[in-house]
Image: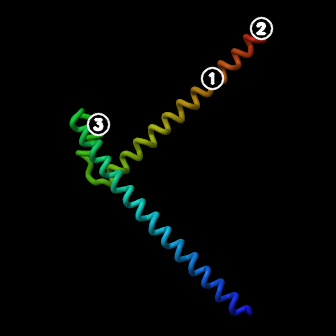
Amino acid sequence: TSDAILAEKRRRNAGASSRFRERRKQREKELQERVVLLEQRVQQLSSALRQYNPKHPLIESAASSTSPQQDLNDRVSQLESIMTRFREEKESDTRKLDALEKENTYLKSLL
């Protein structure tokens, strides 16, 4: 009957929702564990870098930063500027390559 079908649908949907919530909790737990591991790794690498080169800019900027959020924002802006520079270099190199290919084609046509 239709009531039995609807009840079965609700039961299946409830089961699927429950499984979804469990998977989501598991993913969140795994992400939190990953964050802890990565933070530990950052500390290890910072310590190693500090021993190797105490005057390194990353160490000095970390020591002078006012808050972890500000440090993160600074690093993000540094990465964005690096990516912008690389993108510009790529475009420049692409233009140079196109010009060289045109010249190569022209020289081949002269042969």
Q: Which residue does the image show at 24% across and 45% down from the upper left? A: 64
Q: Nearer the viewer, residue 56 or 102?
A: 56
Q: Nearer the viewer, residue 97 or 34?
A: 34
- Where is mark 3, residue-wise? 57
Residue 7: x percent and y percent?
Answer: 64, 89
| Comes first in the chain, label 2 or label 1 | 1
The residue under label 1 is which amino acid type?
A: Leu
Secondary element at image label 3 = helix
Q: Nearer the viewer, residue 14 or 101?
A: 14
Residue 20: x percent and y percent?
Answer: 53, 71
- Where is mark 2, residue-wise? 110
Q: Is residue 58 above or below residue 107?
A: below
| Comes first in the chain, label 2 or label 3 | 3
Q: Residues within 10 Å of mark 2 (few under 14, many from 20)?
A: few
Secondary element at image label 2 = helix
Residue 55: x percent and y percent?
Answer: 23, 34
Task: Report if the CB atoms under discs 2 and 3 are less than 8 Å apart.
Answer: no
The residue under label 2 is which amino acid type?
A: Leu
User: Residue 97, labelled with which disc?
Assistant: 1
Q: Is residue 44 above or below residue 89?
A: below
Q: How many marks?
A: 3
Q: Separation of disc 1 and disc 3 at Cα?
A: 35 Å
Q: Residues within 10 Å of mark 1 (few under 14, many from 20)?
A: few
